[in-house]
Image (spheres, grey):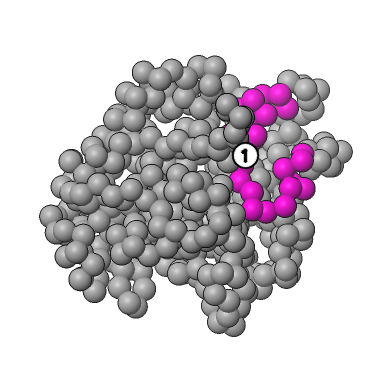
Amino acid sequence: MPSIVQLNRKSRLRVAGLMSGTSVDGVDAAVVDIDAKGVTVLAFDTFAYPKAVRAEIFRLFDPETSRVDAICRLNFVIGEIFAEALVKLCRKCDVSIESIDLVGSHGQTIYHDPAGQPFRGRRVRSTLQIGEPSVIAERTGTTVVADFRPRDIAAGGQGAPLVPYADYALFADRKITRCVQNIGGIANLTFLPAGGSPEDVIAFDTGPGNMIIDRIVHLLTDGRTRFDAGGRLAARGRVDRTLLAELMGHPYFRRRPPKTTGREAFGVQFADELWRRHSGLDRHDLLATVTALTARSIAEAYRRFLPRQPDTVILCGGGARNGTLVGMVGDELAPARVVTTGDFGIDIDAKEAVSFAILAREAIRSRPNNVPSATGARHSTVLGKIVPG
């Protein structure tokens, strides 16, 4: 495998991006070519976790059920799964794995605490992603950049959002103000003002994306279904406006950026409490209402915290496949034009994996790849730890 010095001499790099989000649907794997002209996506797919592994990951999310031996073991198991995903993608799409110069791996976040907890007289902020990069490097023979969040936290940031740097590289425009709106487990935006620089970017988590929706669907179907395909289940219900207004009173929505959130605020416990507390509400109406919560919280974030409304909103993530949710978002953000990353040649599920490929490329070139205006870091810095191939 080429050394980092040799990689830096290449005008074009072939980079793989690997990530798994808060919904734990599986490993997103992308292979891209990056050069001075831009980014070309060569291959992308999502590889589902084995059911037992997914269940174990969910146990790790909860401090009450997580154990240090399980974390240690799953760190290596997920490293193997990430490596296998890349090998499978290369075989499926006829890309030689030997042609890949570099891998950027986000791993699987199991705990993220940007606000911090008091410990021996100081407040300690922390984050933990698993998916051992040494395993990925060993199995693929390729240099791996991983563990991007901790350096930003060490620099005073929240360790998230990580993708605004890549969003700027992919979607910024001289004349059109755009927002990239990812709707994964958690929803997050990147505001790209027309003609702006990376320093002008605003990015933060708007609140829940699919996370509450997925859990309510799980409860509604007695575990038979993991998500609302196309939004068809929510379309059977009616939004309860009183409950929606109550849910919009959550303090996270009023907190000013930079800010991030996650499963700790809007996860299983939040959804299960809604399910119990509103047992008298038609279950499809409850699903429609939490779907509206995602759309309304996105729109409120635009109205509260952006200096101007975007001309175009670019959707990505699994929520962009939920027709009911997309319709609600479009209504909330009118008259902005709502499109998807697919209109720019990037699969709506691929954008974050592509982003980690971009972040990895910048890391090996010792270029800062965080956006302090988005994360709250004191300064720009290079994110990612390098494991040679």
Please say if 217 is above or below 339: above
Q: Can residue 299 be seen in this view?
A: no
User: 287 or 96, which is in the foreground?
Assistant: 96
Image quadrant in which you'd find residue 251? top right
Q: Which amino acid does label 1 sit on?
A: Ala
Q: Residue at x 49, y 37 (%)?
A: 127
Place of residue 210 in the rendered image (x, y in percent of width and height, measured from the top left)? 59, 42
Picture residue at 28% right of the left edge, 50% below the top: 386
Q: Residue at x 52, y 60 (%)?
A: 379
Query: Would you call the spot at circle 1 few (<14 residues within 10 Å), some (14-19), or many (20 or more)?
Result: some
174 on left or right of 286 = left
Q: Which of 83 and 6 is in front in this view?
A: 6
Q: Residue furthest right?
A: 242
**Visible residue check, residue 272:** yes
Whether 376 is among the magenta residues is: no
Horizontal and vertical percent for residue 195? Answer: 58, 80
Q: Name the residue under label 1.
A: 115
Residue 92, given in percent of the width and then of the height, sits at 23, 50
